[in-house]
Amino acid sequence: MNQMENLIMRNTDAIIVMPVDAKASVPMVKQAVNAGIPIISVNRKLENQEVAVSYVGSNDVEAGEILMGQMAKLLGGKGNIAVLEGQMGHEPQIRRQQGIMNILKKYPNIKIVADMPADWYRDKGMAVMENWLQSGLKIDAVVAHNDEMAIGALKAAEDAGVRLFIAGIDATPEALDFVRQGKLAFTVFQDAKGQGKGAIETAVQVVNGKKVSKEVIIPFELVFKEKADEYEAKYK
């Protein structure tokens, strides 16, 4: 909020906001809009998105659908899955879970036997997975809302000597390495660089008085072992 107030005082031509907390960012966004400064949200939508000139990011429902759709294929349409969710109430958590559930409606023989938030963190994902394994749950696969939690689940499974399908979202360099090794089944690439680039390009168009789209969607992409090197190169 202090940063936003400083930018407003400097009469900035446009402001790009990545709302970590969509609800908490509402007052400062209103303040900027009331000062006549156009707002572009990136990566996550604002709770009052209608006041912004544009949103640049990805469709998290699509990410959940890609994640669960591929896992359903690996399971042959049947089996027990566990879900590691992001921090409850965060827009990506809500929408990625929605995507997962959209796919599961098509697969009545795939059952969710465990579902817990691990708040996007590797260590929490590992702790939750350890508890599940120690409880004796029969789990055939784990889908995680992000790669960090998926890696945590992988570490717990390896420590317990258990092999199962595990996958997440983001395609971070470390996750891509685990996909390359065959330890993670796959990942779903979120083009963070593309989102940032798109937000800057949109802001420049706004400043130059050009009309922009209310939404600029950067697609998610499924990444298998064979394409790990290609996606890792995007970070270099």
Image (cartoon, rainbow, N blue to C red):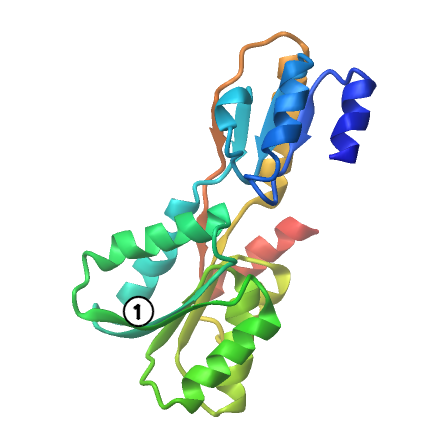
38 or 224, nearer to the observer = 38
Q: Report the quarter where the N terminus lies.
A: top right
Q: Residue at x 29, y 56 (%)?
A: 101
Quadrant of the image occupied by residue 113: bottom left
Q: Which residue is mark 1?
A: 74
SS type, badge 1: helix
**Label 1 crowding class (10 Å Cα cut-off): few <14, some 14-19, many 20+?**
few
- From this view, report whether residue 134 is shown above or below residue 5: below
Quadrant of the image occupied by residue 203: top right
Please provide percent x and percent y for residue 160: 49, 91
Please provide percent x and percent y for residue 180: 53, 69
- Residue at far top of view: 209
* Amino acid, disc 1: Leu
- From this view, report whether residue 12 is shown above or below residue 233: above
Q: Is residue 65 visible to the viewer in this orientation of the structure?
A: no
- From this view, report whether residue 64 is shown above or below residue 181: above
Horizontal side of 157 relative to 210 (left or right) equals left
218 or 39, nearer to the observer = 39
